[in-house]
Image (tube, grey):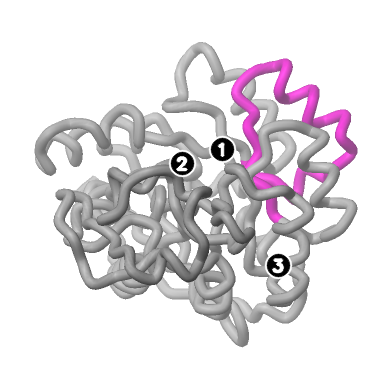
Amino acid sequence: MVKRQSGVTLLLGVLFTILFLACGNGKEKTENKVETATDIQKMFAYRNDNSLMISGHRGSRGIQKPENSLETFRKITEEMPVFFEIDPRLTKDSVIVLMHDETLDRTTTATGKLSDYSWAELQTVYLKDSEGQPTTDRIPKLEDAIRWSKGKVVLNLDKKDVPMSMIVDLIKKCDTEEYIMLTVHTGAQARYYYDRFPHIMLSAFIRNEKEYEDMAISGVPWENMIAYVGYTIDDKNKKIVERLHKQNVKCMTSVAPTHDRLDTKEKRIEAYKLEIAKNPDIIESDYPLEVWQALREK
């Protein structure tokens, strides 16, 4: 039996709570005060303690609520310890909103490119749930999501079409350096954010030796990073994972393109259990509640 501990509930503000769940041992709750911006770095540091964190990709699917919506974030954080990967994009009038696709067709009641709509025009548009059914929920501003998240959960902002300078300005406006994670694909991107926010957490693409060296020469401290290492941990990236662990960097895999696409909950949960057995530090999924169930059953 593979023994896993799970974390993390991000009650950031006065306190955050890390929930650990180990096979046969029930639940153990510990509390840590968040008093400085470096506390988020401590939370995401690799400790070789067999722990597993779960990231909700675009928030979540399968709960009759839309992806990339405040309603979904609220629902999932009520059910489990989690952090979210979300997708900032720009409207025609440069308002940063949450939307994964360039177009509105799949996830909303409108059609065409998001960038062709102003913020005012989007007020008549409604989000669809994961089954394609219209809801009463509207496209949220990133600023509203960030302000809601303070004291509740960490948001990992994916790299879409928003200029990095605008992301920096919004983080400063909301005063949320210690609550936000930023996805970066290159060492140069990592350095840009680090130069402006020395305590920012970064989700860095480090899937091979070339990407590892690119991040290493950026000069950004490893303590500011988690690493996305690919869909799974296997012979292709095992050595990279080992190198990252020596730097105390947590390694994240994503089952969004693989196990999440299985057609039943039962098949997905069994696949998640196999993935958990490979000992990633973080699993990103469209179905975080199901990964959480697989972890508890494991």
Camera sees residue 221? yes
- Highlighted magenta segment, given as a residue range: 201-226
In the image, is 256 to the left or to the right of 90?
A: left
In the image, is 237 to the left or to the right of 215?
A: left
Q: Which mark is residue 251?
A: 1
**Is 116 or 184 nearer to us in this picture?**
116
Report the residue at 64% width, 81% height from top: 33
Location of mark 3 (residue):
170
Residue 207 in magenta stretch: yes
Of badges 3 and 2, nearer the viewer stands 2
User: What x and y, as percent, mark residue 250?
Assistant: 60, 43
Q: Secondary structure at mark 2?
A: loop
Amino acid type at circle 2 is: Glu
Report the residue at 30% width, 44% height from top: 105
How many other residues sit within 10 Å of disc 1, few (<14), some (14-19) or many (≥20)? Answer: many
Location of mark 2 (residue):
102
Of badges 2 and 1, nearer the viewer stands 2
Amino acid type at circle 3 is: Leu
User: What x and y, as percent, mark residue 272?
Assistant: 27, 37
How many other residues sit within 10 Å of disc 2, few (<14), some (14-19) or many (≥20)? Answer: some
Instruction: State the CA–CA distance, disc 3 to disc 2.
Output: 21 Å
Answer whether labels 3 and 2 touch (C-beta < 8 Å). Answer: no
